Image: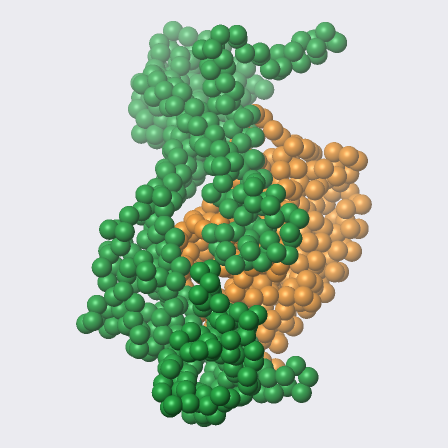
Amino acid sequence: MNLNNLSNLFVYFSIFILALNLILFSIALTQKKKNRITNIAMSLTWLVGLFLVIALILRGIAAQRAPWGNMYEFAISSVTAVVLTFLFVSIKKNIQWLGIFITVPAIILLGLAVIVLYTESGPLVPALKSTWLWIHVSSAIISYGAFSLNFGLSIIYLLKVNNKLKSLPSLKRIDEFSYKVVLFAFPIWTFSVISGAVWAENAWGRYWGWDPKETWAFITWIIYAAYLHSRVTIGWKGTKSAWLGIAGYAAIIFNFFVINIWVTGLHSYAGI
Amino acid sequence: MTTKQISAKQRTETVLPPLNFLGFIRWMWRQLTSMNTALLLLLFVALAAIPGSILPQKTASLIRVNNWKTENPNLANLFESLSFFDVYGSVWFSAIYILLMISIIGCVIPRLKVYFENWRQKPTKTPSVITKFSNYQKVKINKFSLKKIEEIAIRKGWRTFLNNNSLTIEKGFSREAGNLLFHFSLIIITVALAFGALFSYRGTVVVKENTGFSNTITQYDDFRAGRFFSEIQLPNFFFTLNDFVVDFERSEIQRGAPRKFEANITLNGDENINLYVNKPINISGTKIFLTGHGYAPVITVKDKNNQIIFSDAVVFLPQDGNFSSTGVVKIPDTNPQLGIEARFLPTAIVDPVTGPTSTFPALDNPEIFMSLWQGDLGVNSGISQSIYKLDTSKMTQIGLEELKPGQTWNADSGFVISFDEVKQFASFQIAYEPGRFLALVGAILAMVGMIFGLGVQRRKIFIKMPTKSSSSNVIEIAGIAKENHNLEKDILKLLNDLGFNKTKKVSREI
């Protein structure tokens, strides 16, 4: 068995555990506050985090480079970032109730990665051989992870507004938490866009060229800027903020799937 | 209850503009620089950027725009008149972002004024009663005079205002500074983009092995420049492409993917340079990038008198990942005119179903499939023609042949066509982007401003001594801050510096 297959195996394990967690977290949601089921599910989530990191490292070793060369690797990395963000925040804060909203998108994204996006690992095409791959892509992944968390929180907020899910924290807490997540992610996303521009200047001779991918990164940036701005200046909170969070995430997803696969641009060589 | 609601509603309704002209201008200005408008414009910029990411853009590829137009003839004219094929250079897109910039400037200037006024002023006087403020508590500390407490606070970076028996300390001025810096940097970036759009130039050129390029507009295959560009801007240089090296993946995984591009050039006749993807060379601000490559088979055509009527390396444009390439030869000096339409396959196999195809991008089994045409090339009609396409509408085919390097074909009418060897070509992008440094400075400042503007909170802490004493070991303390700031932590930190520990607490009122 080569490293590549071993890496795949860890991804499959992760999907399997996440599926189990889906059931556990669902049950936990119907129960009173802290309970054993939640604890088991959280421990399993740590295992998923570990497996995904191992999968990525193995893939990186197999290819002898950062595991961010194609969409499959990028999808796995993003899920890892989401899961790890969730886990690290859970050490300090009681956010186990978020579990199910992390698990569902994680399963969907990993499933898509394995079924649709899968590519064997291999070396990079020359255009991607650059230190900027590390800088640009790692910051994008971290902010994608945090924005996913914000998306989950926005959905929860809207669900809770419409029918009072008892076991979840108060609306105010969810709202503030999701704001803090954007507060964290936005500067990193900005950095990712800027480092992308620097790289673009190096590779293509212009720092901004309205390539479809760039355009959607810009649109995403604007939506989250509006999220923060509206909150500070005209006091948008709660439902309105949640909808902006969902719009921002929709732009991210559109950029990742639609633009990468269907629209021709300079980022297209990344390959499915 | 009802009347109250109505009056609240009325207050938020738009105030109508006054009737005189100056009043109207002032009203417009106030509307434009209001937060709601700024936010709306921001979202409009995002919305306006969308069509340009979905429809092909002239700035990226004129060919794709024309293809789209022929495929969608109904929408072509409408979209053209809306400048949907040049969104980011269109009047309406510029209008939105210029309005946004004006709105930002309108927001920033008054805030800048307020900021400097606040900066010069001391923090406000402590209110006479502070029990209503958050985290109010009465605590026992070491015996200090207010003067001493002030000194400690200053050392910890607080701005202070000392009154008779009370002290106000304040922190977080960098928040507004960050916000202002951020908005200011957005203006810098926009100026940089505009500067770049006016003075920049970029061009592409295809250079075959053993041929050269010198930096004049006529030598470019495609050249675009900003409005204020003048030809004097072009720096003087020339280079020859000596050798192009490319490696492809040979193992099963990602077979055929490129692994290495390397162009060896001689710059200005004496300097030998290897040019790689992602590693441009810089000649006084103008950068040369390696952007692509392909094959250029050398074809020689002789007529029935054994006279060479054509002999050159011909650039074939790659059509797929395995470098199936197409190219044409036009020989207008014969009568009737002669043309060759050809397909070049670096690793040719003849598939029983799909016909000849290339299975690998390297030159493992190069072959060329030619068809020879005779008639009117249409080059004299005055309409400019692509050098990569043969217009065969007024021509007749007089032969078909497949050749390997070194082979010769004795075609109809006494023409002898030989495929001598395969050379490579590299395509280069040559670009000058004068706004880039300014844009980078703007971007970095924006990051710094954003971190302060989002990360820092403004807060005040009030400290009071018991009346008529300026030195005591019991003080009242309270503070004020935005709800998402952890004021308790600030207060506790300060109290610790004043020798407070929790067990000594006197009383705590909520």
Point 49% across, 33% down: residue: B95
Asked whether, in this view, residue B432 is left or right of residue A48, the answer is: left
Q: How is the structure coloured here?
A: by chain
Quadrant of the rendering where the N terminus of chain B is positioned: top right
Q: Quadrant of the C terminus of chain B?
A: top right
Residue at 24% across, 51% down = B232
Query: Please, is residue B398 above or below residue B266 in the view?
Result: below
The answer to whether residue A124 of the structure is visible from this angle is: no
Residue B373 image point, x, y percent: 52, 79
Image colour for chain A is orange
The residue depicted at 66 percent of the width and 45 percent of the height is A152
Q: Image height check: is B425 above or below A72?
A: below
Residue A135 visible within the image: yes
Q: Looking at the image, which residue sits at the far left?
A: B270
Q: Residue at x 70, y 45 (%)?
A: A97
Q: Colour of chain B?
A: green
Q: Residue B439 falls in which quadrant of the image? A: top left
Foreground pick, A238 / B211:
B211
> Where is residue A130 shown, x and y percent of the image?
41, 64
Of residue B115 and residue A23, the one placed in the foreground of this image is: B115
Total numbered circles: 0
How far from the left and from the top, in percent, is residue B377? 48, 71
Nearer-the-camera pick, B425 or B329: B329
Q: Is residue A191 left or right of residue A157?
A: left
On screen, residue A130 versus residue A61, left or right, reads left
In the rendered image, residue A226, in percent from the top left (x then y), is placed at 55, 35
